[in-house]
Amino acid sequence: MGRSGLLGGSVVSGGGDHDVPLAVGTSVGGYVIDRLVARGGCGSVYRAHPAGRAEPVAIKVLHPTLAPLPKMIERFVREVELLRRIRHPNIVEIKEVGALACGTPFFVMEYLPGVTLDVLLSMRGRLGPEEALEILEPVCAALGAAHAAGIVHRDVKASNVMATGGLGGVKLLDFGIAKLVDPGTSSAGLTSVNRQIGTLTIMAPEQLLCAPVDARTDVYALGALVYRLLTGRLPFESSFPGELVRKHLEEPRRARASVSPSRARSTRWC
């Protein structure tokens, strides 16, 4: 589906050429912005609610300065397409898509109250084995569904997992750099050639070497996530990117870590 077919829906008055956060009260396709939730390298996520109704949603908007770049539009549209391709209870759900009046695309997701694992670990340090297992099982289920659909997430890290503490408790987020590896689809070739794509602290060797990826790439990152949940640290650490890459490629994986069962407690994480 082309850009116009996917994004030719709701629009918002205003917009501009600078990456200035949308103001509280701005109307976006029938939703009213409550507040800025998060801001990343490619876009911003806002909490909003349908006009005249109380239940919130989350809206992800591409940074306006990136909107003129066809490659960024392509990646943004692909994230929507991939999420709609999977549809799993442990993966954030897309509700609708649209574009601002200036042409900047956005999509509307379910709003997830809670915290990312990154925030949770900054508060708690580390988790007990039973608690970590209750988080990892739904993450694995989400990845299993993605892999069955031919999708490699490529960025399975603590900041991309949301723990809500309620029903449906864990959600895998941000498929912005996911790779569709199904050779029978036209989206399979969107990856940049000879560019490392991912997060250095959890990237598999094949990502670091700009080689082809598959489901095992996510398994590697999942192993790094397991290690961090149980120890409060990443398996490889360095302030220098080059040294971090060397450790991933050359150093043996840490096989042991000090884990205290006494740290396990209620799985109502937040």
Image: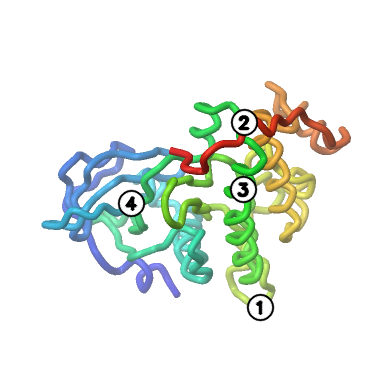
> Which amino acid does the dot numbered 1 rest on?
Gly
Of the pair 83 and 166, the residue shown nearer to us: 166
| SS state under label 3 | loop
Label disc, if present, on residue 184 of the rendered structure: 1
Residue under numbered circle 3: 156
> Which amino acid does the dot numbered 2 rest on?
Arg
How far separated are the C-alphas under marks 4 and 1?
Answer: 32 Å
On-image quarter of the N terminus: bottom left
Q: Earlier in the sequence, mark 4 or mark 1?
A: 4
Q: Judge depth for marks 2 and 3 and give the one in front.
A: 2
Left or right: residue 29 versus residue 246 is left
The answer to whether marks 3 and 1 mark residues whose Cβ atoms lie closer than 8 Å is no
Q: Earlier in the sequence, mark 3 or mark 1?
A: 3
On-image quarter of the C terminus: top left
How far separated are the C-alphas under marks 2 and 4?
Answer: 33 Å
How far separated are the C-alphas under marks 4 and 3?
Answer: 21 Å
Residue under numbered circle 2: 263
Q: Is residue 210 visible?
A: yes
The answer to whether marks 2 and 1 mark residues whose Cβ atoms lie closer than 8 Å is no
| SS state under label 1 | loop
Q: How many residues crowd mark 1 within 10 Å: few (<14), some (14–19), many (20+)?
A: few
Q: Judge depth for marks 2 and 4 and give the one in front.
A: 2
Left or right: residue 250 versus residue 107 is right
Residue under numbered circle 4: 58
User: Residue 35: x percent and y percent?
Assistant: 26, 39
